[in-house]
Amino acid sequence: MVLIAEDDRDIRELVTRKLQTAGFRVIAVGDGLAALREARDNKPDIAVLDVMMPGLSGLQLTTALREDPVTEALPIILLTARSQEFDVEAGFSLGATDYIVKPFSPRQLVERIHAALATGIE
């Protein structure tokens, strides 16, 4: 199961459809607080988090997930328009598994999810 946290409804729906077509079960939410609840309640296999969203940012959410024993090993892909080197470094330093810059290829996202799940990288 893939948890998607993205506040832009169009992107959230696009990613959800693409992942479902690829065979994934998806939980999609529009803010960081809802994502934190879903991660704790449903224990997804991987999370794809927008960096800039209401409630908790993707960076704050990554920190919260890494601090919780239930979700500390959850692979996390940050999906964001923030492409500066320090943004990427910040994401990885907080525990992100991967970092994808918008605009992105939905096919590439599926490939990166498969790669993260196959290698078990955390």
Image (cartoon, grey):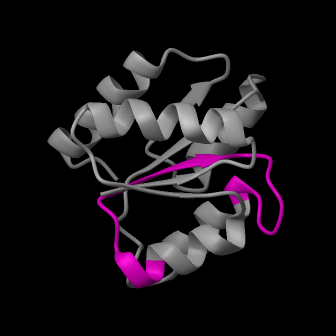
Residue 95 to residue 104: above or below:
below
Q: Position of residue 5 (x, y in %)?
A: 60, 54
Q: Position of residue 107 (x, y in %)?
A: 38, 17
Name the residue at 21% across, 39% down: 23
Count the marks: how many?
0
Residue 8 left/right relative to 69 = right
Residue 116 to residue 56: above or below:
above
Residue 26 left/right relative to 54 = left
**For residue 50: magenta?**
yes
Q: Position of residue 115 (x, y in %)?
A: 25, 32
Between residues 37 and 74, which one lies in front from this camera angle?
A: 37
Between residues 9 and 121, which one lies in front from this camera angle?
A: 9
Name the residue at 64% across, 33% down: 11
**For residue 58: magenta?**
yes
Residue 22 falls in image quadrant: top left
Residue 28 left/right relative to 18 = right
Residue 26 left/right relative to 121 = right
Q: Position of residue 38 (x, y in %)?
A: 50, 75
Residue 30 falls in image quadrant: bottom right
Farthest right residue?
54
Residue 68 to residue 25: above or below:
below
Question: What's drawn in magenta, residue-wise?
Answer: 40-59
Farthest left residue?
118
Q: Quadrant of the N terminus?
A: bottom left
Name the residue at 23% across, 45% down: 117
Name the residue at 83% across, 60% down: 54
